[in-house]
Image (cartoon, grey):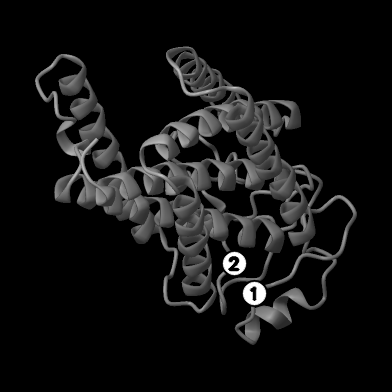
Amino acid sequence: MRSSNPVFSRRGFSRDNGYAGFNAAPQAGGPAVGTQGNPYAQQGGNPYAQNPYAQQDLQHGAPPQAPASAGRMTMDDVVMRSAMTLGTVVVGAVLAWALLPVSSTSYGLAIGSALVAFVLAMVQSFKRKATPALIIGYAAFEGVFLGVISEMYNSQWSGAPFQAVLGTMAVTGATLLVYRAGWIRVTARYARIGMTIAIAFVVVLAVNLLLVAFGVAPDGGLRSSGPLGAIVGILAILIGAFFLTLDFKQIEDGIAYGAPKDEAWLAAFGLTLTLVWIYVEMLRLVASFSGDD
C-alpha cells in the first residue's frame, strides 16, 4: 500500500517495496536487519550492514537507528525542507492577499494557480526522485491560490483565515502528540481502512460537485452552510489528520532505514499537501459555523 495525500498520487519513500511504513518497517524481535524488506538496500547498500548495534536494538525492542551518514536523510533535513516549502506557500499567500483585490479576475487567477499547482504536484508524484524545483513551484502556486481564497473568505467572514490557521496548527499538534504517544498505530490494516474511507469521501465530493455544477444541488449540496456542511468539514479534517499519521510514519521509517537525503523533499512535499488540505477544510468549517453564504 502506497501512502497518499489528498491528491491520492504521491508515492512514498519506498518505490519498489510499497509503503515503507507498512511493508518494510523493522519489527522488534524480527529477523536480523538485512537487505530483505529494506527499500533502500538497493540504493547505496544496506545502512545496517556495518551497524553492530542494529540487532541489539531489535532484541531490546527499540527501533534500529541508521548509521550516521552525510548522504542519509535526517530529521533536520525534513524540518529544513518543510520550512522552505511551507514558507514558500506562506509568501505566495501573503503576496496574493496584498496584491490581488477580491474580484472576478483574482478568482480566475486563483483557479488557474490551483490547476498549475495540481499539475506540478502530479508530475512530482509520478517521478521516481524528488525534484526541488517542482516542489517549490507547486508551493508557490498553491500559495497564490490560498492567498486569494483566504482573502475572499475573510471579506465575508472576518477573521476566518486566522481561525483556520489556528485550527490547522491545533490539528497538526494534536495528531503529532497522539502519534508520538503511541495512541495510534499506523499499520497496514489502519492504512487500508483509512484509505478506503478517504477515497470514498473524495468520490462522493466529486459527485456532489457535479450536481452543484449542473444545478441539481444549487445550495451547495454536501458543502452547504449549516449542520450538514459542518459535519462534512469535520470528516474532511479527520481524514487530513489520518494523512498526517501516514506522513509521520513515512518520515520515521525513512530516517530509521537511512533513506537518501533528497527524500526529505518528498517528506516536505507530502506534509505540505496534507496541511493545505486541512487548512482549506478549516476555512470551509469556519464558514459553515459562521452562517449562510
Label 1, label 2: how far apart the Cα atoms are: 7 Å
- To which residue does mark 2 refer? 26
In this rendering, position of residue 245 left or right of residue 25 = left
The label number, if any, that marks residue 43 in the structure image = none
Residue at the right extreme?
A: 70
Residue at the left extreme?
A: 216
Residue 120, image x, y percentages? 59, 22
Could you tell me if residue 34 is visible in this image?
no
| Circle 1 Cα neighbour tier, 10 Å, few/some/many (<14 / 14–19 / ≥20) | many
Residue 95, image x, y percentages? 66, 30
| Circle 2 Cα neighbour tier, 10 Å, few/some/many (<14 / 14–19 / ≥20) | many
Query: What's the amino acid at mark 2?
Result: Pro
Residue at the bottom extreme?
A: 60
Dot 2 falls on a residue whose secondary structure is loop
- Do the CB atoms of the residues marked 1 and 2 lie less than 8 Å apart? yes
Query: What's the amino acid at mark 1?
Result: Pro
- To which residue does mark 1 refer? 63
Residue 51, image x, y percentages? 82, 70
Q: Residue at x 52, y 28 (%)?
A: 145
In this rendering, position of residue 129 left or right of residue 249 = right
Give the camera-side residue of 14 and 157: 157
